[in-house]
Amino acid sequence: MYFVALTKSNVNPALVFEYLFQKIRVLKAYLGEEFDENSMRNNMTLIYELMDETMDFGYPQNCAVDVLRLYINLGNVKPQDEPEPEQLTKQITGAIDWRREGIRYKKNEVYIDVLESVNLLISSSGSVLRNEVTGRVQMNTKLTGMPECKFGLNDKLVIEKESSAARKKTLVNINDCTFHRCVRLGKFDADRTITFIPPDGEFELMRYRVNDNVNRPFKLFPAVQEEGQTKCSINLKMVAEFSEKLFATHVVVKIPVPKNTSKTKIKNSFGRAKYEPEQNAIVWRIKRFPGKAECMLSADLELVRTVRPKAWERPPINVEFQVPMFTASGVHVRFLRVFDKSGYHTNRWVRYITKAGGYQIRI
């Protein structure tokens, strides 16, 4: 099923794509995550209502599910407490359509997750071809009223403007920031401060990219030696570069082998290593990898002779992992301040997780 947008004039294509993505998100909220052509046909009245509210005279309008469900109650979305007509009008026409008024919590809490993916590509000679981190800040807010939040990271451009004592801390050049629409972009452009009135519940505050001074969680040192057409030996040393106080989980190393491999003899210091013919690779799984630890794997391969010998292409080694409470970019949360008229106390919880994106080492 395809979603297509038609336009009479030359418009910003990013606007069209963003509207289509928002439209799909709204339909998933009403028709379910796995909606299909039949569910679209059976809910044409609902579709027309959603089209009428999300676009007006060709201009995208209200695409916030929380606000749409206040007055469009068909489909799977359950309406919340019925608002007063005056409040409903404010939310439809007001600037802050991602949060409704009158929210109350006994405990005011904010959960912050900094999630990073490391993308690494190293050549067979050991030179770094690609080394970058893509990250996102995920938040779950349980706050009373309409609070204003101020969020700070160890951004180099911000800290350099502050006192010299702050300059001793780790500074990070954060590039390509994209924000949730609740963030006031004018203030960010002026002084790089992230100020916003948060939506209620879970949302993605921002995405970013870091190219400089990336800390590699793991270093791998492979050595491959082909002995004629019938034998091959592989040796791999893997070193954890993060602190010994931390550990990595769900570590999976996929070491490619020739397609005509018939027999393997594998030795490894810890974890489990197994030859999996369907993947043409030795898969090394380690449940828990301590920081600053080293481990070794050696494998002797027996190859079947082929009628037409063909050189082995040597695909790269792929690594998967997850390191809690560690950021490869060095990004960390400096503060989160919550301002509200009542002045209530807010509990803040921060968690860091770094995982492998495309983590490859050529052999």
Image: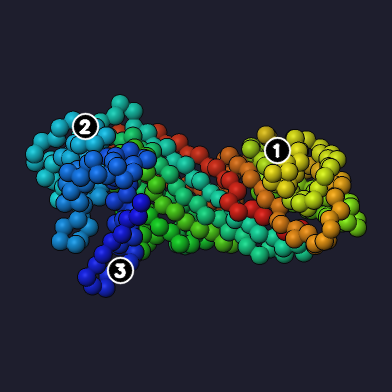
Question: How far is the residue under mark 2 from the one under mark 3?
Answer: 35 Å
Type of the residue with mark 3:
Asn
Name the residue tied to disc 3: 12
Question: How far is the residue under mark 1 from the one under mark 3?
Answer: 47 Å
Residue at horizontal 66%, vertical 65%? 129
On screen, residue 30 versus residue 363, left or right, reads: left
Q: Position of residue 249 (x, y in %)?
A: 64, 37
Type of the residue with mark 2:
Gln
Residue at horizontal 53%, vertical 42%? 352
| Tag 2 near tag 1, CB within 8 Å | no
Upstream in sequence: badge 2 or badge 3: 3
Is residue 159 visible in the rendered structure shown here?
no
Name the mark on residue 285.
1
Q: Secondary structure at mark 3?
A: loop
In the image, residue 193 above or below residue 71: below
Name the mark on residue 80.
2
Q: Position of residue 220 (x, y in %)?
A: 74, 51
